[in-house]
Image: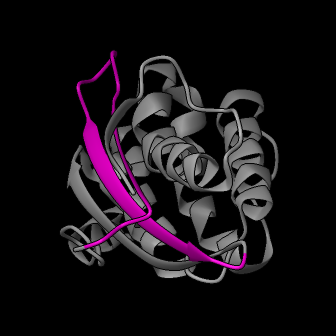
Amino acid sequence: MLDALYSKDVLRRAATISRIGRLETPGASVTRVSPVCGSRITVDIKMEEGVVSDYAQDVHACALGQSSAAILAEKIVGKTLDELRETASALRAMLVDGAVPPDGDWSSLGILAPVHDHKTRHGAVMLPFEAAIDAAAIIAGQDGVAPDTQLTRRS
């Protein structure tokens, strides 16, 4: 069962995570911590004309959270807040309901489908998306920042 959860694809993604570190002048920075597993991520985002123009992350998570963060980092630049919300919704449906994985640019999230059977791991997978959405919402001046989100810096 754990072999499916921590597949070679998941471990490969975790090992190749990009956009590690912090941005010098982000539009918003958000830190989120999963209360279930203790995974922690801080994201920095810049947006121009409603799309993500730069992104960095400081990730302290298991291989599942790192894989999710790696996929997000690979695809986030050029995306809108609405696109991030749609992807997070599809990812959550995959985890909670066993729905089909997101498609298009986000199809690689399908490697995390086995997490469906491990409810305690859902938070680690969702964490990067929730933090990125919170930061983008701050920049857009929209509601949506979760109560447990720590705003670490705002321009």
Q: Looking at the image, what colour scheme do you see?
A: one colour
Q: Residue at x 59, y 71 (%)?
A: 108
Q: Is residue 35 left or right of residue 111?
A: left
Chief secondary structure of the magenta portion: strand
x and y percentages locating residue 10 in the rendered image: 38, 62
State left or right for residue 2 relative to residue 146: left
Q: Is residue 36 magenta?
A: yes
Vertical relation: 31 (above or below) 3: above
Residue at the spot 76% in from the left edge and 37% down from the top edge:
93
Q: Note whether 94 is above or below 103 in the view shown.
A: above
Nearer to me, 73 or 99:
73
Span of residues in magenta: 25-49
Q: In this orientation, does residue 103 appear?
A: yes
Q: Is residue 122 magenta?
A: no
User: On the rendered structure, is 41 left or right of 146?
Assistant: left
Q: Quadrant of the C terminus?
A: bottom left
The foreground one among 123 and 130 is 130
